[in-house]
Structures are given as structure tokens and as C-alpha cells.
Amino acid sequence: MQHYNTKKLIDELQQQTETFLEKAVSEWQMMSPAKLLKQPATDKWSFAQCLDHLNSYGHYYLPAIEKAIETAKQKNWTSRKVFTPGLLGNYFTKLMAPAVEGTKLKKMSAPKSHIPIADLNSREVLSEFIQQQEKLILLLKEARKINLEKAKVPISIASFIKLQLGDTLRFLIMHNIRHILQGEGAIEAPTITGEERNKIATSVSF
Amino acid sequence: MIALVSNRLLIVTTFSALSKLKPVVSNVHLLTNEEWNEFAAIWQPFTAKRKTILTAAGETEKYLYFVIDGVQRAFYLKENADKDATLVFSYTGSFSGVLDSFLLQQPSRYFLETLTASEFIRTTFNQVNELMKRHHNIETFVRKSLALTIAGVLERQIELQSFTAEEKFRVLLKRSPHVLQMIPHKYLASYLGLDATTFSKLLGSVRI
């Protein structure tokens, strides 16, 4: 199993979140609802749908992560230099990894409660996304102080299964990458170009 | 050696920051070379990550900031309310800090936070105060700056109380169009006293 330098891991997760937040504020906010709601095909999600899908996960995971951090603080589970992923956490994160050019993305279907409707208020969805990413930045900052293995978060579809906090963060942010790249593909003239896309897909090391 | 290099780097960074501060000061009130040199000597570099609380409600503001890079906002958080009210933004080339708390040295009623990773130079109340006592011209600079600030606050008060939503939006677009791509629209809507839906509609319909 791969080991991570905890500081480097959180640095990278934070950097990735910063990048998307920056794009959301400087570019996606200025897009028209028509652009954000355009579905490439009737059975394909629009950019807004992708973001709404991510929001539905954030809605569950951000408070759950906050709770895990609180518990860890109370129990004095302080941070450690090295983070070792759990088997399950690693599996979920790798499953979410976006496709690199030339390879095929593993097709998955979203759980029913996370399937977005097509008729969305795109600006509300984007505003919620920005708010959630700002919250995620704050949680990453707090996570630096605690033990990412001992703190645990129950997963959304089966609360008796718990992931290490570090894995939950890896999974959540990898899931963001996956659907943001998907959503960007749904709009004409995406703000993330083919080359940049490939760079993101190949450079993620968590 | 490393300390020496990073020290030198610090001096270079501060130097380039001061060269940005100088025209902003001269624009308000011209200082003599000697006064400027003393004024320039009281600033220290400071950086903060995105979403850092610089001053919390209840704390007394320790610093006056000059923004080299990034965006900050001051907001008021009412007890038991789920929404905060955005009071003011600061960005590259402007002063920042909780000004009333700083000058009166009394607890702040509101928060100041960074909205993006930010780079500043900053100074303390004592340092500014000492210079004001010694140089009439520096006190004049502070007085004139405050007069301009009060004029700005009252102008905003007029806009908040008697402008329509569309007029408020147009004023923002005319005065600072760049903020639309720098600041989450939720905060801009709050700053203008509009709800987010109205702001979205105006963004879709108003063009200048």
C-alpha cells in the first residue's frame, strides 16, 4: 500500500480545490444559464447537473467530515507525518479517477438519491458549489491538525461502513475532479482545455 | 546563509510593495521625502491563505493593511442568524483592516476575512500613532484618507437606501466591473442588499 506524506497530501487536495474554486468564481459564474444547462445528449448530464450531483455529496459529506474532525479534536488524535490509506478508501478513490486520454472511463451510474434533475436553477447550483468548496477549504485547514487515519467518516450509502478521514477527503476531491471534467465536456468552449484536462488526469497523485 | 537570503527576499518584496503604496499615499496627500521614508519604514510583509479570518468580532484590530494581492471582505454576523451581511471589500491597491476598531482601539463588531490567498504589508496602531504625533503632514494624510472614506460610506448609504436593484447593479458594474469575476456573487448580492435571485436576473439582463 502506498504511503503519503500527510502535509503533501493535504497540500495537493487543497491546491486542487483552490483551482476549481478559482475557475468557478472567475469563469463559471459568468456563464449563461443556457450554457450551464446544455445537455450534450438527452441521456447526458449538463455542467449544472454535474455540479448539482457534486453538491448532493457535499451536502452529506461536509457536515460528516466536520463531525469527524470535532471528534478527533476532543479525543486528541493529533496529526501524524505519514498517512496510509485504507483498502476500501483506496478502492473508492481509484474508482473515481478521471480517464486519461486514450483510456476509457469506467462507466458508472449514480445512486438514485444523487441523480440530478435536468431543470435546475443553474446559478443557485453554482452558488451552492462555491459555498461548499469554501467550506471544504476550511475543513482541509482543520484536517491538518488531526490524525487522518483514526478519524472516521461513515459513507453516504451505507452508514455502517466507515472510511478514514484522509480517504474520505481523497475520494471526495477525486469525485469532484471526475465530474468537473465531465461537466466541462458538456459545454462548448470549455474553460479547461484538452491539454489541461489530461494534465489534471495524469498529475493527480492521491 | 539561508536566513540571509530569505531576509534579502523579504526586503525586496517589501520594497516592491512600498513602491505600490507610495502613489496611493501621494494621491491623497503629498509627504516630504523624510516623512515618506519614516512612513515607509513601519510596514511588514504578511501573507494569508484563502478564507483566513484576519480579525474576528470581539477582537481589537491590531493592524492596518495595504493589499498587494488578493480580495478580502468584512462581514457582520448576527447572533443566531444563518446569513452574514457583507459590509465592504478590499483588494489590490487598497487599504484593509477593521478601520474603526483600529483607530479607536476598541473591539470590532464584525469580521474581516480573505476571500482569496492574499499578500499584504501591514503596520500597527502604535507605529501609525507615533508618526502622526511627530509629523503634522502624516496626520493630515490620515485625516484626508478618513474624509474620503466617510464620503464613500455615505455615498453607499444613499445607494443602499434610495436606488432600485437595477441601479445598484449598474453602479457596481460601472465602478468596479472586475469584481464580478473575482468575488462569489453571493457576497456581491449581499453587499448590494439584493437577494441572490435578483442579482442573477440582473446579471443575465443588464449590459453596459
Image: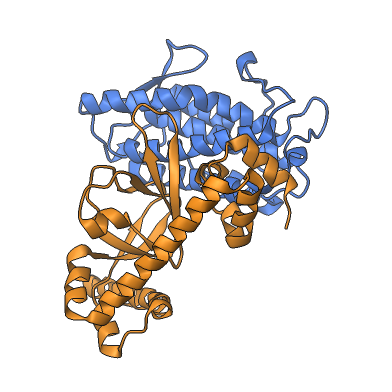
Chain colours: A blue, B orange
Is residue B61 or residue B135 the one in the foreground? B135
A129 relative to A105 in the view: left or right: left
In the rendered view, tell whether residue B135 sits above or below residue A96.
below
The N terminus of chain B, quarter of image: bottom left
Q: Residue sitting at 71 percent across and 50 percent down?
A: A194
Answer with left or right where residue B111 lies relative to residue A182: left
In the displayed structure image, the side of residue B57 where residue B181 appears, left or right: right
Residue A199, horizontal then vertical, whole percent: 61, 50
B28 up-or-down from A77: above or below: below
- Please identify the quarter of the rendering in which residue A140 is found: top left
Q: Give the image location of residue B14, x and y in percent.
A: 33, 74
Q: Can you say whether B152 is above or below A54 in the image?
A: below
Residue occupying image coordinates x 68% and y 37%: A182
Percent position of residue A183, x then y:
69, 37
Would residue B74 be visible to someone looking at this image?
yes
Name the quadrant containing residue B12: bottom left
The answer to whether residue A99 shows anywhere in this view is no
A163 shown above or below B183: above
Quarter placement of the C terminus of chain B: bottom right
At which x and y percent is residue A161? 43, 14
